């Protein structure tokens, strides 16, 4: 029996060539899995190409660098969060319901997509070149992360000014709620073995306390 050449064994079986968009999606899905499991800094483009079933040169047809791949993951995550915020407030009938829905949508999104969330909010600030945030630019001219934050702020701005934000300006309220949401998601993801109380009860209680605090007279 003839031995399989070492090079063939390392590369594995190449997947049939698909459309560019399908291949790009495969690369991003594999990168999300590998970055989350092994750490962004440890994963090489060679390892990622092998996971997808293409050559390293083939990978570079879609992404020039590993940073570009991470940026694409982060952008897609922000875009999905923006859509989640829009969907959350669509069914709200009162400002208080809309605020509760916004807080809940942030936490629910992060917990439903822990790998994407951590890569976007925990890894990317150190791994990606910083992007200047200039919120005075038109919405469509903003990068994906800024659009997600601004959409959250704009939904808050649409609430009755005196209630439930307690007179806070929407930008301040948005940043406070980001503190709260990010802290909740990060702890629940990174400390799964902590003896948390029932998750639904914990999140519902958090929402009630935050909303009561925002709407309190100042």
Image: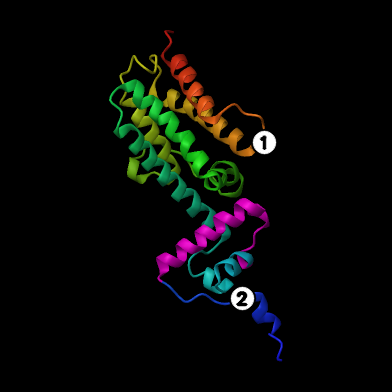
Residue drawn where x is 34% and y is 38% of the image:
87
Residue drawn where x is 47% and y is 76% of the image:
16
Residue 50 at x, y = what percent? 60, 69
In the displayed image of the protein, which residue is found farthest to the top? 217
Q: Is residue 141 above or below residue 4?
A: above
Q: Nearer the viewer, residue 96 or 1?
A: 1
Give the label, 2 or 1, closer to the camera.
1
Residue 34 is covered by the magenta coloring:
yes
| In the image: residue 1, left or right of residue 187 | right
- C-beta proximity under 8 Å, tags 2 and 1: no
Q: Is residue 63 above or below residue 153?
A: below
Q: Give the alpha-carbon distance from disc 2 to disc 1, as whole Å.
A: 37 Å
Query: How did the renderer colour the structure?
Result: rainbow
Task: Label 1: state its secondary structure.
Answer: loop
Magenta segment boundaries in residue numbering: 19-46
Q: Are there few (<14), some (14-19), or many (20+) residues within 10 Å of tag 1?
A: few
Residue 88 at x, y = what percent? 36, 34
Residue 176 at x, y = what percent? 49, 24
Residue drawn where x is 60% and y is 49% of the image:
127
Q: Which residue is mark 2?
A: 12
Residue 111 at x, y = what percent? 52, 39
Q: Are there few (<14), some (14-19), or many (20+) residues within 10 Å of tag 2?
A: few
| In the image: residue 86, left or right of residue 64 | left
* Quadrant of the rendering where the C terminus is positioned: top left
Instruction: Please tell me the numbered disc located at residue 86.
Output: none
Task: Label 2: state its secondary structure.
Answer: loop
Q: Nearer the viewer, residue 179 or 188?
A: 188
Residue drawn where x is 62% and y is 68% of the image:
46
Q: Which residue is mark 1?
A: 193
Mark 2 vs 1, N-terminal side: 2
Q: Dominant secondary structure of the magenta stretch?
A: helix
Residue 32 in view here: yes
């Amino acid at each position: 029996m003839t031995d399989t050449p070492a090079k063939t064994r390392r590369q594995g079986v190449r997947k049939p060539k698909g459309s560019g968009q399908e291949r790009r999606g495969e690369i991003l899905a594999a990168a999300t899995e590998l970055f989350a499991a092994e750490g962004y800094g440890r994963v090489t483009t060679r390892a990622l190409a092998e996971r997808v079933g293409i050559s390293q040169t083939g990978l570079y047809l879609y992404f020039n660098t590993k940073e570009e791949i991470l940026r694409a993951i982060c952008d897609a995550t922000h875009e999905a969060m923006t859509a989640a915020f829009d969907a959350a407030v669509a069914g709200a009938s009162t400002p208080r319901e809309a605020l509760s829905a916004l807080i809940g949508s942030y936490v629910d999104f992060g917990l439903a997509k822990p790998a994407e969330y951590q890569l976007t909010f925990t890894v990317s600030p150190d791994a990606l070149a910083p992007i200047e945030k200039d919120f005075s630019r038109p919405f469509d001219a903003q990068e994906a992360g800024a659009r997600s934050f601004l959409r959250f702020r704009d939904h808050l701005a649409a609430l009755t000014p005196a209630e439930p934000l307690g007179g806070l300006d929407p930008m301040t309220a948005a940043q406070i709620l980001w503190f709260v949401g990010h802290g909740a998601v990060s702890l629940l993801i990174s400390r799964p073995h902590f003896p948390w109380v029932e998750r639904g009860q914990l999140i519902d209680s958090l929402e009630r306390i935050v909303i009561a605090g925002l709407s309190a007279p100042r």
